[in-house]
Amino acid sequence: MIKKILKMIIMYNSVLLKKIIPLKRKKWVVIGTGNMASTYTQILQSSFNANVIGVVSRDISKAKKFSKKYCIMYSYTNVDDLIRKINYNLDYIYIASPTFTHYKLILELLNYGVNIVCEKPIVTNINEFKTLESIMVNKTHFIVEALWSNYLPTINKAEDWIENDKIGKISNIKINLCKKIDDKKVNSSYRNEDKLGIFSDFGIYPFAFLANFIAVLPDDVNKTIIYDTYGISEVQLSFCSYNIKIDIVISSLKNSENKAYIYGDLGHIEFSSPFNRTNHVKLFNKHRMIVEDLKYLYVYDGYEFIIKKLNSSKSRNLVQLLDIQMAKTKFSLQLLDKVINYE
């Protein structure tokens, strides 16, 4: 509670300071008023080089309440009305609405020539992604998935260890992400016609994690899938990619220690639980002795790193970075496609 209060105090002070010191800042519009919208908006409003100038929600009362809480100027139920109001003068639109709305929203927003940052998963299947990919070929702006976990320093450090041959040739990657969900009926992530279940929620994280370390899709996937009323509730996967054995368990039926491991012939890397948001990563040698044990400071649970990249990177460097990230998004959706047999 104290931490939450301190964050709000920091945000309000930052908003006040930005009014006193009028500099050119990145302008954002947020679509949605849920948990992720709140998280990103608080960080953006606390950042000295960004301003959230508008929020869109189907419920105007929610939009107005959200605007008041986070010191936002405009509240609308229609994104077109908001963009016309601000005369198209913005840099980013952040989509934090339910997954099943993403594809249609992105198609509509592409007409405005603005950069789009969309919550994960960006779309529900690889075919939708390929359509967006083809549309964006000649565009000067970009779309990127707000998969903040890919920007964490723990991921960067693991990539550095692997590049510098600290664990040798990778032989096995194990990922476990199990989180019991009791309130699917009221969770908007599970209310969609595709019946993706956990893959409309947290289930995409293991695939996104994997995309940082392998780039070749498997030919075959051994899988066990459990369904419930809302779609996929648990998957157990085993497959090989370039002689690397991959083992993944994802479940909304139980809780577990949600760690990830990357094994090589010279050692291994361990991501503490929960691996997708941890600030703690360890490097072991082949004798299973700790070589490095690193903990990073996260002010906003790690969400701040993606926002820092988007607000501060130079244009050319940012485009190159986001091209890499979208290639990882494509890999994740192609793997998802193999798992649930869209084709």
Image (cartoon, grey):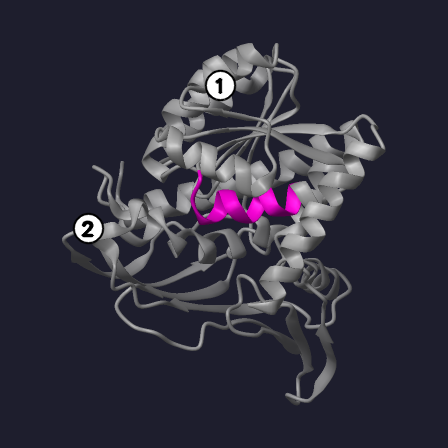
Q: Is any atom of residue 118 visible in this view?
A: no
Q: Could you tell me what secondary structure mostly forms the magenta stretch?
A: helix
Q: Nearer the viewer, residue 194 or 127?
A: 194
Residue 83 vertical position relative to residue 46 in the rendered view, above or below: above
Q: Is any atom of residue 149 visible in this view?
A: yes
Q: Position of residue 330 (x, y in %)?
A: 49, 38
Which residue is denoted by mark 1 in the rendering?
A: 109
Q: Is residue 288 left or right of residue 249?
A: right
Q: Amino acid at mark 2?
A: Tyr
Assign a secondary structure to mark 2: loop
Q: Does the segment drawn in magenta span residue 40? A: yes
* Number of residues whose C-alpha sits closer than 10 Å to that of mark 1, classed few (under 14), some (14–19) or many (20 or more): some
Q: Which circle marks residue 292 in the picture?
A: none
Query: What's the distance in space between the residues labelled 2 and 1, CA to CA?
Result: 29 Å
Assign a secondary structure to mark 1: helix
The residue at the far left in this view is 229
**Residues marked 2 and 1 touching at CB (< 8 Å):** no
Classify residue 286 by image quadrant: bottom right
Q: Position of residue 296 (x, y in %)?
A: 72, 68
Count the marks. Answer: 2
Q: Position of residue 231 (x, y in %)?
A: 20, 50
Give the position of the C terminus as an image quadrant.
Answer: top left
Residue 1 vertical position relative to residue 323 in the rendered view, above or below: below
Q: Which circle marks residue 230 in the picture?
A: 2
Q: Which residues are drawn in magenta?
A: 33-44
Q: Does the segment drawn in magenta span residue 172? A: no
Residue at 46 percent of width and 14 percent of height: 80
Q: Amino acid at mark 1?
A: Leu
Q: Position of residue 115 (x, y in %)?
A: 61, 24
Classify residue 203 by image quadrant: bottom left
